[in-house]
Image (cartoon, rainbow, N blue to C red):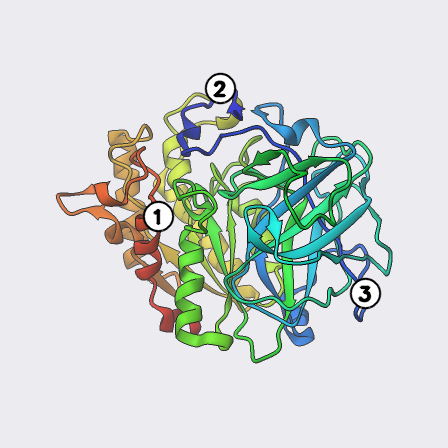
C-alpha cells in the first residue's frame, strides 16, 4: 500500500494510494525523422508537422513522503505502462521523461503494442528506437522523443509502452494516480506478448509522459484537461478509463469521428493553483507552461483546479500539505487570471469549470464553503474565461447544492465516481469547445 506521511486523509483520494509500485516503459522504431533529446516543441510547430498528442500525464518528482516504488527507483526491471488513446494515427512516437531524475536514465530497450486484456498484447510488440538505436541515456532534467514507430493506433484504445531499465535509476519521474494498472517484471520483458512474466501491479505511470500520433486525416488539434485529482480521475474504476477527460474524448469521437480533437489529461492529484507540494507536484501556475503551453498542437485548455487550495488552508503545514497557510478566494482568482493571460498570449482558448461540491468531505469548513462560493460566483459571472462549464451543478445533490449527488459520489464526499465523471463530461458544450 502506498502511504503519504502526514497526509493520509488526503489520500482518501480514493484507492489513490493502493499498491506498491514498480517501473516503466518506452522506446521507438525508425520510420522517418530521427528525434533526439530535446525540450518539447511549441504547439504551432507540432501541428504543422502532423504530429498530435493522443495521451499525456503530468510528471511529478518522487519523494520520501510517498512510500512507493518511485522513490526507490528501478534496476534490471521492466515496466509496462497501459495508456488510453484519444485519437488514432498511422504512426506513433513516445516521450520518456527524466525531468525530475537525479542521475542519467538508462533506457535499455522499449516496445509498443496494442493491449488485448490486462497487460497482454494482441500481437508482437513493436520495437522503439531513438536516433535508430534501441537504447538511449536521458540526461537529468531532460526528455527524449522516440523515432516514429510504424504502428497504426485507433482512437479510444489501450496501448502498452514497455521499458527495460537495466541500471539503477534512482528516484523516478512518474505520475502518481494513474487509475490504471501498470505491469512490473524483473529483467527484460519488453518483447513479451503475454503478461505472465509481470508478477506485480501498480497504479502509477513511470517515466512515460506523452504519446504522439501522426494523423492520417484532418486534425482539430488538442484539448488539454488541466486540474487536480478530480481531473486525474481519482474515484473512477481502475482500468476502465472512467475519468471525465476520457468521457469527453468519447463524446468528441462520437460527434466528429476522425476530425475530433485529441484530449489529454494533465490532472495531478492533490495539485494546487498557488503552492507546490513535495507529493503533488508543482503548482498549476508553475507547471502550466510545461503541461499545457508546450504540448504539441494545443487549441484549448479546460481548467478545474482550486479545491485543494481551499481545503489545504485549514490543514497543518506539514508533509504533503506543506507549504500550508490560509489562501483566499481572491488569491485563487488571481491565479486563474494569470493562467488566462498566459493561454491567450499563446493563442489558446481557456475554459473554466466551477469547483465541484465538497460539503460532506473531510475538506469542508464554513470558511472553505464561503471561498468555494466566491470562486464559483466569479467563474460563472466574470466573463474572464472564453467559456465556462458548470461541473458543480452537473453533479450537485438536488437536495443540497453544497454536496455531491449521492449517485455521483465515489464515497468520500469529494471525488466523483464513474457516473459523476460522465455527468461532468456531458456538461461540456462540444460546439463551444471545437468552434
Residue 221: x %, y % from top left: 54, 71
Cα separation, mark 1 vs mark 2, equals 29 Å
Neighbour tally class for label 3: few under 14, some 14-19, many 20 plus, Cα within 10 Å:
many
> Looking at the image, do the residues carrying marks 2 and 3 touch, with CB atoms under 8 Å apart?
no
Q: Based on the displayed image, in which of its 4 quarters is residue 31 positioned?
A: bottom right
Residue at image location 45% in from the left, 51% down from the top: 241
Cα separation, mark 2 vs mark 3, equals 47 Å
Q: How many marks?
A: 3
Q: Nearer the viewer, residue 369 or 46?
A: 46
In the visual, does 28 lie left or right of 360? right
Which of pointers 2 and 3 indicates the residue nearer the eye? 3
In the visual, does 180 lie left or right of 195? left
> Looking at the image, do the residues carrying marks 1 and 2 touch, with CB atoms under 8 Å apart?
no
Work out whether 25 lies above or below 347. Answer: above
Q: For the residue labelled by badge 3, is the local secondary structure a helix, a strand or a loop?
A: loop
Q: Nearer the viewer, residue 93 or 119?
A: 119
Cα separation, mark 3 vs mark 1, equals 39 Å
Q: From the image, tell me which residue sits under label 2.
A: 6
Residue 278: x %, y % from top left: 58, 30
Q: From the image, tell me which residue sits under label 1.
A: 418
Q: From the image, tell me which residue sits under label 3.
A: 30
Q: Mark on residue 361? A: none
Q: Based on the displayed image, in which of its 4 quarters is residue 80 positioned?
A: top right
Please say whether residue 100 is visible from this viewpoint: yes
Neighbour tally class for label 1: few under 14, some 14-19, many 20 plus, Cα within 10 Å:
many
Q: Quadrant of the C terminus?
A: bottom left
Q: For the residue labelled by badge 2, is the local secondary structure a helix, a strand or a loop?
A: loop
Residue at image location 76% in from the left, 42% down from the top: 164
Residue 34: x %, y % from top left: 82, 65
Q: State which tag comes first along the sequence, 1 or 2.
A: 2
Q: Nearer the viewer, residue 188 or 63?
A: 188
Amino acid at each position: 500500500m502506498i502511504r503519504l506521511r502526514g497526509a493520509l486523509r488526503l489520500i482518501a483520494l480514493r484507492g489513490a494510494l493502493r499498491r506498491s509500485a514498480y517501473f516503466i516503459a518506452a522506446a521507438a522504431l525508425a520510420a522517418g525523422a530521427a528525434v533526439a533529446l530535446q525540450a518539447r516543441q511549441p504547439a504551432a510547430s507540432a501541428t504543422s508537422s502532423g504530429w498530435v498528442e493522443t495521451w499525456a500525464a503530468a510528471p511529478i518528482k518522487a519523494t520520501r513522503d510517498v512510500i512507493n516504488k518511485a522513490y526507490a527507483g528501478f534496476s534490471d526491471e521492466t515496466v509496462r505502462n497501459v495508456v488510453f488513446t484519444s485519437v488514432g494515427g498511422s504512426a506513433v512516437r513516445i516521450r520518456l521523461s527524466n525531468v525530475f531524475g537525479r542521475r542519467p536514465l538508462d533506457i535499455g530497450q522499449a516496445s509498443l503494442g496494442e493491449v488485448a486484456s490486462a497487460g497482454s498484447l494482441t500481437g508482437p510488440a513493436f520495437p522503439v528506437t531513438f536516433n535508430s538505436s534501441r537504447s538511449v541515456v536521458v540526461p537529468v532534467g531532460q526528455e527524449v522523443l522516440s523515432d516514429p514507430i510504424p504502428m497504426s493506433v485507433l482512437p479510444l484504445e489501450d496501448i502498452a509502452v514497455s521499458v527495460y531499465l537495466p541500471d539503477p535509476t534512482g528516484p523516478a519521474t512518474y505520475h502518481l494516480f494513474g487509475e490504471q494498472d501498470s505491469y512490473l517484471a524483473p529483467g527484460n520483458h519488453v518483447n513479451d506478448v503475454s503478461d505472465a512474466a509481470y508478477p506485480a501491479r501498480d497504479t502509477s505511470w513511470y517515466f512515460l509522459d506523452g504519446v504522439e500520433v501522426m494523423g492520417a486525416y484532418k486534425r482539430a488539434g488538442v484539448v488539454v484537461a488541466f486540474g487536480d485529482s478530480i481531473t486525474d480521475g481519482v474515484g473512477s474504476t481502475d482500468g476502465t478509463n472512467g475519468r471525465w477527460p476520457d468521457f469527453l474524448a468519447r463524446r468528441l469521437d462520437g460527434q466528429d469521428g476522425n476530425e475530433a480533437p485529441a484530449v489529454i489529461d494533465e490532472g495531478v492529484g492533490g495539485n494546487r493553483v498557488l503552492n507546490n507540494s513535495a507529493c503533488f507536484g508543482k503548482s498549476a501556475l508553475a507547471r502550466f507552461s510545461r503541461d499545457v503551453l508546450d504540448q504539441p498542437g494545443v487549441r484549448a485548455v479546460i481548467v478545474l483546479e482550486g479545491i485543494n487550495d481551499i481545503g489545504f488552508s485549514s490543514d497543518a503545514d506539514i508533509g504533503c500539505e506543506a507549504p500550508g497557510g490560509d489562501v483566499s478566494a481572491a488569491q485563487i482568482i488571481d491565479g486563474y487570471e494569470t493562467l488566462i493571460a498566459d493561454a491567450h498570449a499563446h493563442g489558446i482558448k481557456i475554459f473554466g469549470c466551477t469547483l465541484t461540491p465538497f460539503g460532506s468531505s473531510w475538506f469542508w469548513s464554513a470558511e472553505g464553503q464561503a471561498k468555494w462560493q466566491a470562486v464559483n460566483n466569479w467563474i460563472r459571472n466574470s466573463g474572464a474565461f472564453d467559456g465556462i462549464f458548470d461541473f458543480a451543478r452537473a453533479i450537485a445533490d438536488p437536495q443540497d447544492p453544497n454536496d455531491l449527488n449521492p449517485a455521483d459520489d465515489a464515497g468520500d464526499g469529494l471525488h466523483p465516481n464513474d457516473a459523476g465523471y460522465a455527468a461532468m463530461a456531458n456538461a461540456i458544450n462540444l460546439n463551444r469547445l471545437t468552434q
